[in-house]
Image: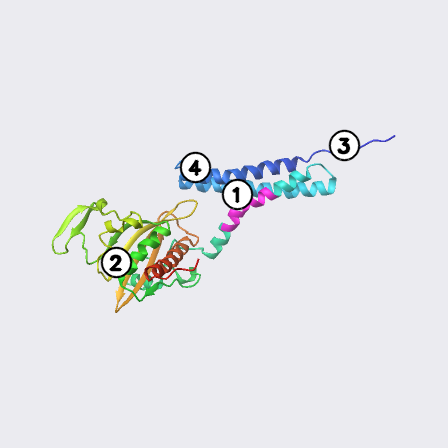
Amino acid sequence: MAGHYLTRRSRSATWAWNLSIFALALLPISVAFFRLHVLDQAALSLSLLLAGGIAALGLLLALFAILLIWRGGARGGGRAVAALMAGCIAAIPFLGAAYLFSKYPNGHFAETTGMRQALAETAAPVAPISTLDGVLVGRNFQATASTVYQAARAALEKSGMTLVDVQTPEMLRPQGPDLGVSGTVTVPIPTLRDSLNLDEDEDETSDDPYADLDSDDYTIRAVGYVPLFGFPSDATIRIVETDGTTYVDMRSVSRNLERDLGQNRRLIQGFLNRLDEAMKIEEGITPDS
């Protein structure tokens, strides 16, 4: 007389699958709600911690289910393996964040060596050397400061940064939240600062009152953003010409983060790389594609 054994389905595999999928879905939902201003930064942190905890629990249950199925022959092996894979995918962002935290454990700002020296005599905080993965070095070009300034404007646009303000001794500004300066230095004429159109596209640089200035000193203030989350960083770019050589240094400070996980360093490096490309175009050299 022939017969067969009934094998039960592993509940652990089902729970592991449900938890892993939930964690995998919670991550993009949390980010989307934060970008839509439904969640604030504290709520985002709690939501991401919850997703990480659920993903870890799903991984443990998946491993437990695979062990039980291997030893007891229960059904649900495919579901357990799928839950393990989903849990691993959900854990990738947290593993990446842990790696960046170990590499950049402190600090929420970064600057090039030239900017560091300029700030050494002020009260501004300077990033500890121990947190730097190598030294951030500025750029120097055998070109006028005005040429480098125009290249910096193009580099800002390609970097996705928002221009906030430009200062130069050749165009002094009165103190005030909403006034700029037009005309000569000796007889400044106040105008609305918004009328300067400093954040327009590169094709409209003719509206930029600084584009045609023959200055040897520019200070650009801009805002950069963390990819995905959009956390802002306040950037300061200094362009100074001395004896025919123009030096460019930069500082970037996170506005809302106590630890930037190296984002400000990456922002500076990305801008300087794009500045190199923009200067090649200014000099009539086609950058390698």
Disc 3 versus disc 2: nearer the observer: 2
Residue 228 colored magenta? no
Q: What amino acid type should be assigned to the residue bearing mark 4?
A: Phe
Residue 280: % across, % down: 36, 61
Q: Is residue 88 magenta?
A: yes
Residue 6, labelled with which disc?
3
Question: Under tag 1, what secondary structure?
Answer: helix
- Sequence-wise, which precedes: disc 3 or disc 2? 3
From the image, tell me which residue sits under label 4: 33
Q: Check if mark 1's residue and mark 3's residue have beta carbons within 8 Å.
A: no
Quarter of the image holding residue 214?
bottom left
Task: Measuring from the top left, give residue 213's x and y in whole percent.
Answer: 21, 57
Residue 174 visible to the viewer: no
The CA distance from mark 4 to mark 3 is 46 Å
CA separation, marks 1 and 3?
37 Å
Relative depth, front residue between 258 and 245: 245
Q: Which residues are magenta?
A: 85-96
Task: Of the two numbered discs 2 and 1 on the same chain, state the one appearing first in sequence.
Answer: 1
The residue at the far bottom in this view is 243
Q: Which mark is residue 52?
A: 1
Q: Distance between the Cα atoms at labels 4 and 2? A: 39 Å
